[in-house]
Amino acid sequence: MTRRKKMVERVKKLMNKPEKIRDIGIVAHIDHGKTTLTDSLLAGAGIISQELAGTQLFMDYYELEQQRGITINAANVSMVHEFEGEEYLINLIDTPGHIDFGGDVTRAMRAVDGAIVVVDAVEGVMPQTETVLRQALRENVKPVLFINKVDRLINELKVDKKEMQLRLSKIIDDVNELIKGMSKEKYEQGWKVDASDGSVAFGSALYKWAISVPSMKQSGIGFNEVYDYCQKDDVKSLAEKCPLHQILLDMVIPHLPNPLEAQKDRISVIWYGDRKSIVGEAMEKCDPNGPIALMVTDIMMDPHAGEVATGRLFSGVLRRGQELRVSGMPATSRVQQVGIFIGPDRLEVEEAPAGNIVAITGIKDVIVGSTISSIEMTPFESIKYVSEPVVTVAVEAEHTKDLPKLIEVLRQLSKEDPTLKVEIDEETGEHLISGMGELHLEIVAYRIEHDHKIPITTSPPIVVYRETVQGRAGPVEGKSPNRHNRFYITVEPLPKEVIQLIKSGAVSMRVKELERRQLLMDAGMDKEEAKNLAGIYGSNVLLDMTKGIQYLRETMELILEGFEDVMRNGPLAKEPCQGIKVKLVDVKLHEDAVHRGPAQVIPAIRHAIHASILMANPAILEPILDVYIHVPADQMGSASREIQGRRGQILDVHSEGDLVIIRGKAPVAELFGFAGDIRSATEGRALWSTEYAGFEVLPSNLQVDIIRQIRQRKGLKLEMPKPSDYVDL
């Protein structure tokens, strides 16, 4: 029996013991060493050879990941680790670090219960470290810390023993500061990371060694010895005496929860159904005898098996041949295969019980974020992403014959990656893809051309804008085309605190009404308004402030449809709206239902909201990125000029050793081509990264030009729209 086969047998045996399972993710800023670390863990588990670990990048098995040296897709692997004489099953997800693939991190956090946060000892806590930590805590995923590249402190920065320990303890303090700031409650419950209790490890993923306080007691090798080994360049002996996989997984097992413990705590955060229902109780207990409740966190195409849906099973046991339903879909589908992943290989298993990360085939109509179950159940809370699609390209097939295939591929890609927004204009043959950034869209174009063999042409990238209001307007009267129905609308800006609650998912129409009302009032909304919330679309709300209007209940669905139409396509440039509070203050309806159908109500609502927005000091919002640049002191001026020359602002400059760290922000529209320019301006010596910072109002001197450009691109009339275009004034 080969070593690999033995491993698979051990994995299958442990899948039935939830107390022996750890579902974990590896998260970090880009280039802090996640995939190299995963390699070393796999080598320790016997899945890949020790010699190749760290350079093989086993989990970056997609060809483009190997070429570019970055992780693009989150990849799963199951392996067995022995701790204190007992075997444990580790289901691990290696996630990307680049901001453009942050959606993969968010989805992975839904599937796991614990996370190893990796921080580079030289760079310290970086913007993406903060982002991934926030994603983990939002999903109730417990962190432990691995400080990587400790050898670089000694060999490159030449710090002494005392300075090394000071730097390492500063990183621990910084991480704890973030945890405390994001979730004080969790911090006080003991979720802080602490070297003395063993929830922090130090080491080098590339050279496969690590130490922690418990390992120091066992091996007698502490910081002084590590310092001496690194100075003598004898990392091989260090790796033999303190193997990374052993130390790290010995940290994971006591400090990160098993599914039985985790699900008690997590279900209330990721599922808003009735906790006392059959499925609610089964999920909290991680009960294999309960109904099936699976949350899909990843979809990929297998040329032989078709769509493979991977996700976390919260209750029940999956077997081949079961009839399961996807929430919101009428028909059931039959499971064809059940499997687990070991990197690129999917291995079939007879059954997979609750608490595991599993892959299934045969389920139709599934998308990332779907809930799959054996009974009718409230779906899991939708996954909330940190950033939004901010860049768009138009894609066209070079040959007309490829058009049907291209439409099919784009639909498939948007199913696999919900952070990709695809709009297909089947009349003009133009297809718009919106993504997280230039790199995200480059990868999508590469996949269409190379994986699906469709030659395409892509337009230069276009920025996605938003529309909002800066003042108050109304009541504005919207009349139905037959003049029998009248709607009175006011609009005003939504407070920032409320927008934040909606974007984080804390407030939605699925949250219980009393709880939602309280949250809105705490965020500064008037009690009467909080009570009358009728709908949410994006980060906009519709409030029904009317009293006792006959027939309004049955018309409400059409009113919401009109509201959503406008929030999708604002009046200035048909861009989505953001942060608008729309109030319905009065309504006059015809008593005969025939005279208040969709063709009457929807246009009346649409026109009234469009006109109100145009009267409420409307504005265009543009996406902004925070920019972080690490550069030698003598290149600081050139780097600063690169940001300032792009309508950017320098927010902070501080130095660490001979490096200067510049923090600034700049509009996405001005950052195209930034990579090449900063490289040539600093002779290739700058390290930089960006982080999504939300939308800000476009400077007033640019508003009219930008609106005209967008209108021209979309084939709309070039004159600026006026309220009188929509209603009689």
Image (spheres, helix red, strand yellow):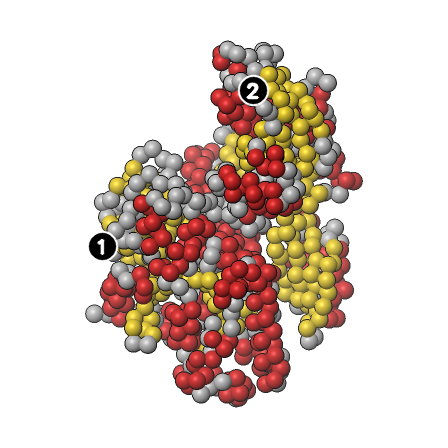
Q: Nearer the viewer, residue 569 or 391?
A: 569
**Where's the C terminus, which quadrant?**
top right
Residue where numbered disc 2 is placed: 549
Q: Quadrant of residue 74?
A: bottom left
Other-residue count near label 2 (Cα within 10 Å), few / some / many at <14 / 14–19 / ≥20: few
Residue 560, placed above or below residue 246:
above
Decide if residue 88 is on the left or right side of residue 689: left
Q: Position of residue 458 (x, y in %)?
A: 56, 42
**Where's the N terminus, which quadrant?**
bottom left
Q: Quadrant of residue 687?
A: bottom right
Query: Disc 2 or 1, which lies upstream in sequence?
Result: 1
The type of residue carrying mark 2 is Ile
Other-residue count near label 1 (Cα within 10 Å), few / some / many at <14 / 14–19 / ≥20: few
Decide if residue 316 is on the left or right side of residue 227: left
Residue 305, placed above or below residue 424:
below
Q: Nearer the viewer, mark 2 or mark 1?
A: 2
Q: Position of residue 117 (x, y in %)?
A: 50, 65
Residue where numbered disc 1 is placed: 350
Decide if residue 365 is on the left or right side of residue 232: left
The type of residue carrying mark 1 is Glu
Point out the residue furthest to the right here. Answer: 701
Which residue shows up at 32% across the image and 68% down it?
A: 88
Q: Position of residue 228 (x, y in %)?
A: 53, 88
